[in-house]
Amino acid sequence: MLARWFGFPNRLEFLSAIYHQQVDLADLKRFRSDGVRLVEIEEKTARQEAEPLVPENMPRLKSGNKPEVIINGEPGSYYQYSFATCCNPVQGDAIFGFILAIGGVKIHRATCPNATHLLANYEHRILKAGWGNTVKADFLTNIIVTGIDSGPGVIHQLTDKISSLGINIRSFSISGESGYFEGRIGLIVANTDQLNLAMRALKSFEWVSNVSRED
Protein backbone atom coordinates (compact mmCIF):
# COMPACT_ATOMS: atom_id res chain seq x y z
CA MET A 1 0.00 0.00 0.00
CA LEU A 2 2.69 2.51 0.99
CA ALA A 3 4.79 1.83 -2.11
CA ARG A 4 1.87 2.65 -4.36
CA TRP A 5 0.84 5.68 -2.28
CA PHE A 6 4.31 7.17 -2.72
CA GLY A 7 4.05 6.53 -6.45
CA PHE A 8 6.25 3.45 -6.86
CA PRO A 9 5.20 0.40 -8.91
CA ASN A 10 6.54 -2.19 -6.45
CA ARG A 11 8.27 -2.68 -3.10
CA LEU A 12 11.76 -2.91 -4.64
CA GLU A 13 11.55 0.54 -6.21
CA PHE A 14 10.13 1.95 -2.95
CA LEU A 15 12.87 0.42 -0.77
CA SER A 16 15.55 1.54 -3.22
CA ALA A 17 14.21 5.11 -3.03
CA ILE A 18 14.29 4.97 0.78
CA TYR A 19 17.89 3.73 0.64
CA HIS A 20 18.85 6.69 -1.56
CA GLN A 21 16.90 9.09 0.73
CA GLN A 22 14.46 10.00 -2.04
CA VAL A 23 11.37 9.49 0.15
CA ASP A 24 10.21 11.77 2.97
CA LEU A 25 9.26 9.26 5.65
CA ALA A 26 7.93 12.09 7.84
CA ASP A 27 4.66 11.71 5.94
CA LEU A 28 4.14 8.36 7.68
CA LYS A 29 3.31 10.17 10.94
CA ARG A 30 0.17 11.58 9.35
CA PHE A 31 -0.83 8.13 8.15
CA ARG A 32 -0.71 6.70 11.67
CA SER A 33 -2.76 9.41 13.37
CA ASP A 34 -5.15 10.77 10.75
CA GLY A 35 -8.06 8.40 10.14
CA VAL A 36 -9.27 10.47 7.20
CA ARG A 37 -5.88 10.15 5.56
CA LEU A 38 -6.02 6.37 5.92
CA VAL A 39 -9.35 6.29 4.13
CA GLU A 40 -7.86 8.41 1.35
CA ILE A 41 -4.97 5.96 1.03
CA GLU A 42 -7.34 3.04 0.67
CA GLU A 43 -9.37 4.88 -1.96
CA LYS A 44 -6.25 5.84 -3.91
CA THR A 45 -4.89 2.28 -3.69
CA ALA A 46 -8.17 0.92 -5.01
CA ARG A 47 -7.98 3.28 -7.99
CA GLN A 48 -4.36 2.37 -8.67
CA GLU A 49 -5.11 -1.36 -8.60
CA ALA A 50 -7.21 -0.82 -11.71
CA GLU A 51 -4.22 0.84 -13.43
CA PRO A 52 -1.00 -0.75 -14.78
CA LEU A 53 1.57 -1.32 -12.03
CA VAL A 54 4.33 0.09 -14.23
CA PRO A 55 4.00 3.78 -15.24
CA GLU A 56 4.18 4.53 -18.95
CA ASN A 57 7.34 6.62 -18.50
CA MET A 58 9.20 3.86 -16.62
CA PRO A 59 11.87 2.22 -18.84
CA ARG A 60 10.90 -1.33 -19.75
CA LEU A 61 13.02 -4.10 -21.12
CA LYS A 62 12.69 -4.67 -24.84
CA SER A 63 10.86 -7.76 -25.97
CA GLY A 64 12.53 -10.28 -28.21
CA ASN A 65 14.73 -13.23 -27.45
CA LYS A 66 15.69 -12.07 -23.96
CA PRO A 67 14.62 -14.81 -21.55
CA GLU A 68 11.77 -14.09 -19.18
CA VAL A 69 12.74 -13.92 -15.52
CA ILE A 70 10.42 -13.83 -12.50
CA ILE A 71 11.81 -11.66 -9.69
CA ASN A 72 10.27 -11.81 -6.22
CA GLY A 73 7.12 -13.25 -7.71
CA GLU A 74 6.72 -10.38 -10.19
CA PRO A 75 7.39 -10.23 -13.95
CA GLY A 76 10.99 -9.34 -14.68
CA SER A 77 9.79 -6.55 -16.99
CA TYR A 78 9.06 -4.50 -13.85
CA TYR A 79 12.79 -4.37 -13.16
CA GLN A 80 15.92 -3.24 -14.95
CA TYR A 81 17.67 -6.59 -14.78
CA SER A 82 20.73 -8.01 -16.48
CA PHE A 83 22.73 -11.22 -16.26
CA ALA A 84 25.96 -11.38 -14.25
CA THR A 85 29.07 -11.97 -16.34
CA CYS A 86 30.89 -13.52 -13.37
CA CYS A 87 28.80 -16.69 -13.67
CA ASN A 88 26.91 -16.36 -17.00
CA PRO A 89 23.50 -17.84 -16.05
CA VAL A 90 21.91 -20.10 -18.66
CA GLN A 91 18.20 -20.76 -18.97
CA GLY A 92 17.52 -23.68 -16.64
CA ASP A 93 20.09 -22.73 -13.98
CA ALA A 94 18.99 -22.05 -10.40
CA ILE A 95 19.27 -18.26 -10.07
CA PHE A 96 18.78 -15.34 -7.66
CA GLY A 97 18.60 -11.57 -7.97
CA PHE A 98 20.90 -9.01 -6.37
CA ILE A 99 19.83 -5.36 -6.00
CA LEU A 100 22.56 -3.04 -7.28
CA ALA A 101 23.44 0.12 -5.35
CA ILE A 102 22.92 2.19 -8.50
CA GLY A 103 19.54 0.59 -9.20
CA GLY A 104 18.43 -2.43 -11.14
CA VAL A 105 18.89 -6.12 -10.45
CA LYS A 106 21.72 -8.44 -11.44
CA ILE A 107 20.81 -12.09 -12.02
CA HIS A 108 23.37 -14.62 -10.70
CA ARG A 109 23.59 -18.41 -10.79
CA ALA A 110 22.93 -20.00 -7.41
CA THR A 111 26.37 -21.61 -7.75
CA CYS A 112 28.08 -18.33 -8.66
CA PRO A 113 31.54 -18.05 -7.04
CA ASN A 114 30.37 -14.74 -5.56
CA ALA A 115 27.11 -16.14 -4.16
CA THR A 116 28.48 -17.02 -0.72
CA HIS A 117 29.91 -13.51 -0.24
CA LEU A 118 26.70 -11.81 -1.40
CA LEU A 119 24.44 -13.96 0.77
CA ALA A 120 26.65 -13.50 3.84
CA ASN A 121 27.12 -9.74 3.56
CA TYR A 122 24.15 -8.40 1.59
CA GLU A 123 21.25 -10.67 2.46
CA HIS A 124 18.87 -7.68 2.52
CA ARG A 125 19.61 -7.08 -1.17
CA ILE A 126 18.95 -10.66 -2.31
CA LEU A 127 15.75 -11.39 -4.25
CA LYS A 128 14.21 -14.70 -5.24
CA ALA A 129 14.34 -15.28 -8.96
CA GLY A 130 13.38 -17.97 -11.42
CA TRP A 131 12.82 -18.49 -15.12
CA GLY A 132 9.49 -17.66 -16.73
CA ASN A 133 8.25 -19.10 -19.99
CA THR A 134 10.92 -20.87 -22.01
CA VAL A 135 12.00 -18.82 -24.99
CA LYS A 136 14.55 -19.27 -27.72
CA ALA A 137 17.52 -17.26 -26.49
CA ASP A 138 21.29 -17.22 -26.72
CA PHE A 139 23.50 -17.58 -23.65
CA LEU A 140 27.27 -17.38 -23.51
CA THR A 141 28.88 -19.94 -21.24
CA ASN A 142 32.42 -21.26 -20.86
CA ILE A 143 33.61 -24.81 -20.36
CA ILE A 144 37.04 -26.24 -19.53
CA VAL A 145 38.24 -29.42 -21.23
CA THR A 146 41.32 -31.31 -20.02
CA GLY A 147 42.93 -34.47 -21.33
CA ILE A 148 45.87 -36.18 -23.01
CA ASP A 149 47.44 -34.24 -25.86
CA SER A 150 47.32 -36.78 -28.68
CA GLY A 151 48.65 -34.39 -31.33
CA PRO A 152 47.56 -31.68 -33.79
CA GLY A 153 44.11 -33.23 -34.28
CA VAL A 154 42.87 -32.37 -30.79
CA ILE A 155 41.51 -28.93 -31.65
CA HIS A 156 39.91 -30.18 -34.87
CA GLN A 157 38.13 -33.06 -33.13
CA LEU A 158 36.83 -30.91 -30.29
CA THR A 159 35.46 -28.20 -32.56
CA ASP A 160 33.96 -30.70 -35.00
CA LYS A 161 32.14 -32.51 -32.21
CA ILE A 162 30.59 -29.27 -30.93
CA SER A 163 29.67 -28.04 -34.42
CA SER A 164 27.98 -31.36 -35.22
CA LEU A 165 25.51 -30.61 -32.41
CA GLY A 166 24.52 -27.31 -34.00
CA ILE A 167 26.19 -25.32 -31.20
CA ASN A 168 28.18 -22.21 -32.04
CA ILE A 169 31.65 -21.62 -30.62
CA ARG A 170 32.33 -18.05 -29.50
CA SER A 171 35.92 -18.51 -28.34
CA PHE A 172 38.57 -21.22 -28.09
CA SER A 173 41.95 -21.29 -26.41
CA ILE A 174 44.19 -24.24 -25.56
CA SER A 175 47.47 -24.78 -23.77
CA GLY A 176 49.54 -27.91 -23.23
CA GLU A 177 52.31 -29.16 -20.98
CA SER A 178 53.93 -32.57 -20.33
CA GLY A 179 51.62 -34.36 -22.74
CA TYR A 180 48.39 -32.89 -21.33
CA PHE A 181 46.20 -30.06 -22.57
CA GLU A 182 43.63 -27.66 -21.12
CA GLY A 183 41.15 -25.96 -23.41
CA ARG A 184 38.72 -23.15 -22.63
CA ILE A 185 35.76 -22.99 -24.96
CA GLY A 186 33.10 -20.28 -25.07
CA LEU A 187 29.78 -21.68 -26.30
CA ILE A 188 26.50 -20.08 -27.36
CA VAL A 189 23.70 -22.30 -26.01
CA ALA A 190 19.94 -22.03 -25.61
CA ASN A 191 19.64 -23.69 -22.20
CA THR A 192 21.29 -26.06 -19.74
CA ASP A 193 20.07 -29.09 -21.69
CA GLN A 194 22.07 -28.02 -24.73
CA LEU A 195 25.08 -27.21 -22.55
CA ASN A 196 24.99 -30.63 -20.88
CA LEU A 197 24.64 -32.28 -24.29
CA ALA A 198 27.86 -30.61 -25.45
CA MET A 199 29.72 -31.58 -22.29
CA ARG A 200 28.65 -35.22 -22.56
CA ALA A 201 29.69 -35.31 -26.20
CA LEU A 202 33.19 -34.07 -25.41
CA LYS A 203 33.53 -36.55 -22.55
CA SER A 204 32.94 -39.36 -25.05
CA PHE A 205 36.51 -38.97 -26.36
CA GLU A 206 38.78 -41.49 -24.65
CA TRP A 207 41.59 -38.95 -24.42
CA VAL A 208 39.41 -36.37 -22.62
CA SER A 209 39.74 -36.74 -18.84
CA ASN A 210 37.35 -34.02 -17.68
CA VAL A 211 34.84 -31.46 -18.95
CA SER A 212 33.50 -28.86 -16.52
CA ARG A 213 31.67 -25.58 -16.57
CA GLU A 214 33.82 -22.59 -15.73
CA ASP A 215 32.70 -20.83 -12.55
Image (spheres, grey):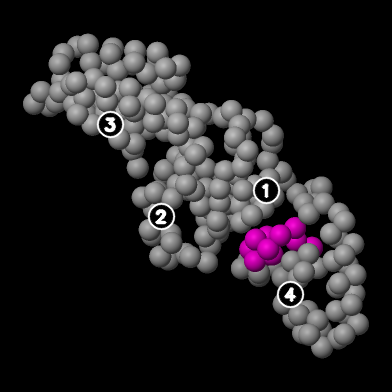
**In this figure, which residue is indicated by the disc labeled 4?**
24
Horizontal arrangement in the rendering, residue 26 relative to residue 205 (left or right) = right
Mark 2 packing: few (<14 Cα in 10 Å), some, or many (20+)? some
Q: Answer above or below: position of 123 versus 130.
A: below
First reached walking from the N terminus: tag 2 or tag 4: 4
Indicate whether residue 155 is drawn in magenta. no
Q: Are marks 3 and 4 in contact (CB under 8 Å)?
A: no
Secondary structure of the residue carrying tag 2 is helix
Q: Amino acid at mark 1?
A: Pro
Label at residue 115: 2
For the image, the number of numbered tags is 4
| Residue plotted at (22% across, 11% down) | 153
**Which portion, as a residue range, is magenta?**
6-17
Q: Answer above or below: position of 194 versus 82.
A: above
Q: Answer above or below: position of 67 versus 102.
A: above
First reached walking from the N terminus: tag 1 or tag 3: 1
| Residue plotted at (33% across, 22% down) | 201
**In this figure, which residue is indicated by the disc labeled 1?**
75
Q: Amino acid at mark 3?
A: Val
Indicate whether residue 16 is drawn in magenta. yes
Label at residue 211: 3
Q: Amino acid at mark 2?
A: Ala
| Residue plotted at (78% across, 85% down) | 32
Where in the figure is residue 119, as x and y percent of width and height? 43, 61
Q: Give me the C-alpha separation between circle 4 and circle 1.
A: 28 Å
Secondary structure of the residue carrying tag 1 is strand
First reached walking from the N terminus: tag 4 or tag 1: 4
